[in-house]
Amino acid sequence: MSIKDKKYAKRIEATFSKYPDKRSAVMPLLYIAQEEYGWVSPEGIQEVAELCEIDPTQVKSIAGFYTMYSEQPKGKYWLQVCTDLACALNKADDFYEELKQELGVDDGGTTEDGLFTVEHVMCLAACDKAPMLQCNFHFHEKLNKEKMRELLAQWRADAAKEA
Amino acid sequence: MDQKYILLRGREVKNIHKLKTYEENGGYAALKKALSMKPAEVIEEVKASNLRGRGGAGFPTGLKWSFIPQNEPVKYVAVNCDESETGTFKDREIMETNPHQLIEGALICAYAIQAKAVYIYLRGEFWDLAHEVDKAIADAVKAGYAGDNILGSGYSCPVYTHLGAGAYICGEESALLNSLEGKLGQPRVRPPFPANKGGGLYGEPTVINNVETLANVPWIINNGAAAYKSMGTEQSPGTKVFCVSGHVVRPGNYEFTFGLTMRELLFEHAGGIPDGKKIKGILPSGGSGPIMKATDEMLDVKLTYEDMAKAGTILGSASIVVMDETVDMTWVASRVTKFFKHESCGKCTPCREGTYWLDKVIDRIMAGGAQMSDIDLINNIAKNMQGVTLCALGDFAANPIIHTIKNFPEDFRQHIASGSSKPARGAAS
Ligand SMILES: Cc1cc2nc3c(=O)[nH]c(=O)nc-3n(C[C@H](O)[C@H](O)[C@H](O)COP(=O)(O)O)c2cc1C
Ligand code: SF4
Ligand code: FES
């Protein structure tokens, strides 16, 4: 396992070609590391640092600054529910409660089968379509309990198929 | 006050996100025209249009471009698609439905300042969108509109996307530049300003514009500054996308020429308040602008930069969040405060500490354990954050609370007098 594997070579090369400076690739490469390891693991940080020719502690502080880099292993499906003001006015809090109950986890928790991690987040630029969530950074909007159950069933089926 | 689609053309022209359809509808004609003009003439035209920045501050766009020194060899354009303000979702629709217009506008800007490259900074959550934009850029390069020797003019300029990773502060322009350079996304000390040597991307002079701002530019070049100025008002020309959310029947984006009233927007177009309820409060510019009581006078204010300022608030990014009569404004202040506490980058003490303490005191009020003197305490903390921080987030964070206390004092008093919290959430839930 490494982001220096051949399968990423083209993407990494294309990333470096965008910027006059290697350091600028740190964010795109952290995404690749997260893809490879499921989170920004110490190995991932080390590899990004080597590729960008900066200190691993700097890479680590950047990973820590941004919320979309996960500093611990997450479930296969990372569900982020917006409970910010505009969504909250349209029952996003209730929706989030229902989701947590449905999965039997608390805020920030991961289900025992390792499939789902849930989290509440700030505005995701979908305020006219509340309640909403992002699953691994894809939008799902205008949700309710029924639609949520359908989505969960779908993801469970997808995971089973892959396994 | 007319409905006119300049920015949200995707609603009228199906498939305009595709290059072929965009071309069939006049796409890239403005770029061609601009390339036949001198760069300074392009800047003059945009200046004459009095186009104002749509990222929140309303700064004149042509003027901003004219600050870029001509004799510097390396210059950049950075497009701000960070769109993270609570209640804002306009840049997303523009980019999803009409990406080529943004690319064209950014390239016209690049030509006008003779930039070496364009970077489009998208918030990380626009992951799927960024990939669509990458495809649109590739199509534009293939057709000769971007990249090397654009349309045979001898001018070259690549366009790149760059994804953020979940930090509101990266919408602040100097933090955005740091983030692009692979540094912590924290604001920079100014001067030097981004337009000057030492202040921009990689230390080179840089124009930073919002997506909506640049999406106006092709229309201005095609139709001329005079035609643009004939729409809207003298100080707020053109059209604006208004994001309407919260308690309205039809939330969504609305594009109008500047100058319709809040009442027209919310009641005629957005369908008014659901379930026959009354309107109580309005956040005209997401979390960062002063919260207003929805009085008759407020509803009759024209949605322009100048009229909103006169009314004691701001148009900002025009992300209008509506609250009905059931909403407890202390709860609103608490939500907005939590947002800013979460998003403070921690670089300056008044903002880092201030957002923490504001949140703590409001929590106490919400929990019913506060005293009347806490209102003064909040005002005190908030006032000590204003005007003393490195970026405007410190002011943004102080604003909602000061204005909630000012405009809805009874909501605060109720919590304190009753000594208990009422579970006042949003809609009648
Ligand atoms: C805390 C903070 C957050 C901001 N977020 C955004 C944003 O998400 N999008 C944006 O275009 N401008 C944002 N701005 C404003 C930018 O700093 C900058 O003024 C703007 O991008 C300039 O573009 P314009 O002249 O086209 O408006 C933010 C400013 C601050 C202080
Ligand atoms: S005002 Fe707040 S967000 Fe802005 S630089 Fe200071 S600490 Fe960071
Ligand atoms: S408030 Fe939830 S997406 Fe904007």
Image (cartoon, helix red, strand yellow):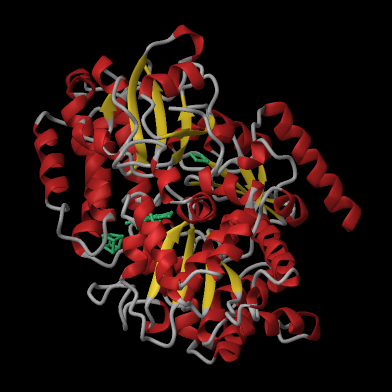
Report the front residue among A48 and B304: B304
Closer to the camera in the image, B18 or A51? B18
- Front residue (pair B259, B300): B259
Q: How many marks?
A: 0
Q: Is residue B42 above or below residue B26?
A: below
Vertical relation: A27 (above or below) B262:
below
Outermost residue, right direction?
Answer: A161
Residue displayed at 33% across by 69% down = B66
Residue drawn at x 38%, y 36% as measured from the top left: B232
- Vertically, is A163 above or below A86? below
In percent of width and height, residue B23 lies at 72, 54
Residue B344, image quadrant: bottom left
Q: Is residue B146 above or below residue A129?
A: below
- Image coordinates for residue B171, horizontal then vertical, percent: 42, 59
Residue B392: horizontal and vertical position, in percent? 26, 56
Q: Is B171 situated left or right of B403 in this image? A: right
> In the image, B32: left or right of B391?
right
Asked if residue B424 can be seen in this view, the reply is: no
Q: Dividing the image into four equal quarters, which quarter contains ligand 1?
A: bottom left
Question: If the image is split into quadrants, where does the N terminus of chain B sit?
Answer: top left
Q: Quadrant of residue B47?
A: bottom left
Q: Residue at x 55, y 33 (%)?
A: A128
Which x, y percent locates residue A24?
52, 80
